[in-house]
Image (spheres, helix red, strand yellow):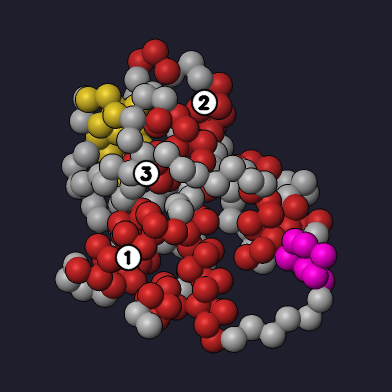
Amino acid sequence: MARYTGPSCRLCRRENMELFLKGDRCYTDKCAIKRRNYPPGQHGQGRTKTSAYGVQLREKQKVRRIYGLLEKQFRGYFQEADRMKGVTGENLLSLLERRLDNVVYRLGFASSRSESRQIVRHGHFTLNGRKVDIPSIQVRVGDIIALREKSRTIVTVNDALEAVVRRGVPQWLELDRDGYKGSVKGTPTREDITTPIQEQLVVELYSK
């Protein structure tokens, strides 16, 4: 599966905000955007004038990078959201939030979405009692996501669970830390997504 393998901190600097792509490092003074708060490259500190299209493009790139998707994958989610009933932008965010790798991250089993994608791909989780290794699976209300018995000694997972208090668990999910499992209580609403995202700009970009 194709994925971005370049420096993560470069993406945060390009979008001029913390995307929390490197887990706990993003909360420390080592965070690149705290030390160099300007876009990467030799012209990063120069003055730039952004057009309306540029603003829409940057917003789309920001959302895509937050969830770790390539352009073809992201456009596919938009097309699916556009076919659904309701507001397209909110449908898009709901689809992205209900990805299995994002749910594992939201529950606190990983410190970043890239880390959660990796442990899902390695088959450390079960979905409703069955082993899964596909990060893009869409979870549904009532689903149970559990860490497999033999995977409960993984240091990074236990460290992430210790730090989940700082990030919190969304209201549409429920975490059972002692049982190393979580459940989907409902469908994520716009209010549950606290990341500063202007999804309407993404809709306007793809609707041209």
Q: Residue at x 75, y 52 (%)?
A: 32
Q: Is residue 160 magenta?
A: no
Q: Quadrant of the N terminus?
A: top left
Q: Tell which circle, 2 or 3, labels the residue nearer the N-terminal end.
A: 3
- Mark 2, residue position: 158
Identified by mark 3, the residue type is Val
- Which residues fall within the magenta stretch? 38-45
Count of numbered tags: 3
Query: Against 24, is 205 above or below?
Result: below
> SS of the residue at dot 2?
helix
Q: Residues at badges 1 and 2 in contact (C-beta under 8 Å)? A: no
Q: Residue at x 42, y 18 (%)?
A: 151
**Mark 1 to mark 2 CA distance (whole Å):** 34 Å
Can residue 21 be seen here? The reply is yes
> SS of the residue at dot 3?
helix
x and y, in percent, of residue 137 in the image: 28, 42
**Mark 3 to mark 1 CA distance (whole Å):** 19 Å
Dominant SS of magenta comes to loop
Foreground of the two, 51 or 63: 51
x and y, in percent, of residue 77 in the image: 32, 59
Q: Is residue 42 magenta?
A: yes
Identified by mark 2, the residue type is Asn
> On residue 47, which mark appears?
none
> On residue 103, which mark appears?
3
